[in-house]
Amino acid sequence: MANMQVAETILAQLGGRRFIVMTGAKNFLGDERSLSFRLPGAGGRTTDGINYVKVQLNAEDTYDLTFLRLRGVNVKHVAERKSIYNDQLQEVFTRVTGLNTSLGTMGGFPASAVKAFNNRHED
């Protein structure tokens, strides 16, 4: 049985259950060094029809991300990002796929700006 600690950590760093709900990710496969999953690429939900992602821990203790479009037996390599730090995973995923990983500020103001506004306008 494979040690799934790295795969579980990757999923947690992507956002865990919120990530799954927000992106529709499914069919997760994990091993000692990586996590792969499918995305609902049909219907224009993702940039360039990306419907498969692999996140792999590399020798520098950072992550390499591979974004693919799978159609039957056809595999198209859409994008790759190397040496991504764990705190950059969500941002890079969103930038490449166009899918938000959490509700966050989704087009709104950064939390720091909202806090500053509220501090200035307290009664």
Image (tube, rainbow, N blue to C red):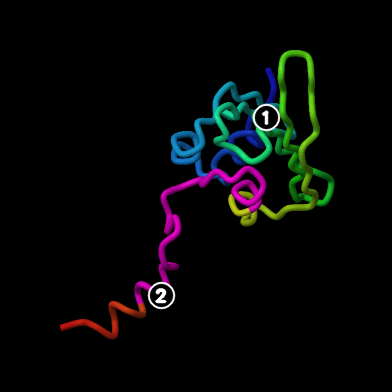
| Residue drawn at x 70%, y 55% as measured from the top left | 85
Q: Position of residue 65 (x, y in %)?
A: 74, 42
Task: Please state the horizontal and vertical placement of residue 49, each as a whole percent of the image.
Answer: 66, 33
Give the amino acid type for the residue marked by disc 2 in the picture. Ala
Q: Position of residue 38 (x, y in %)?
A: 62, 26
Q: Which residue is mark 1?
A: 52
Q: Residue at x 51, y 44 (%)?
A: 15
Residue 113 position in % (x across, y down): 41, 75
Q: Residue at x 71, y 38 (%)?
A: 55
Q: SS of the residue at dot 2?
A: helix
Q: Amino acid at mark 1?
A: Tyr
| SS class, disc 1 | strand
- In primary-sequence order, the first of circles 1 and 2 is 1
Query: Would residue 44 appear left or right of 65 to someone viewing this image?
Result: left
Number of labelled discs? 2
Q: Are marks 1 and 2 in contact (CB under 8 Å)?
A: no
What range is drawn magenta here? 92-115
Q: Which residue is mark 2?
A: 113
How many neighbours does mark 1 have within 10 angstroms: few (below 14), some (14-19), or many (20 or more)? many
Q: Nearer the viewer, residue 58 or 54?
A: 54
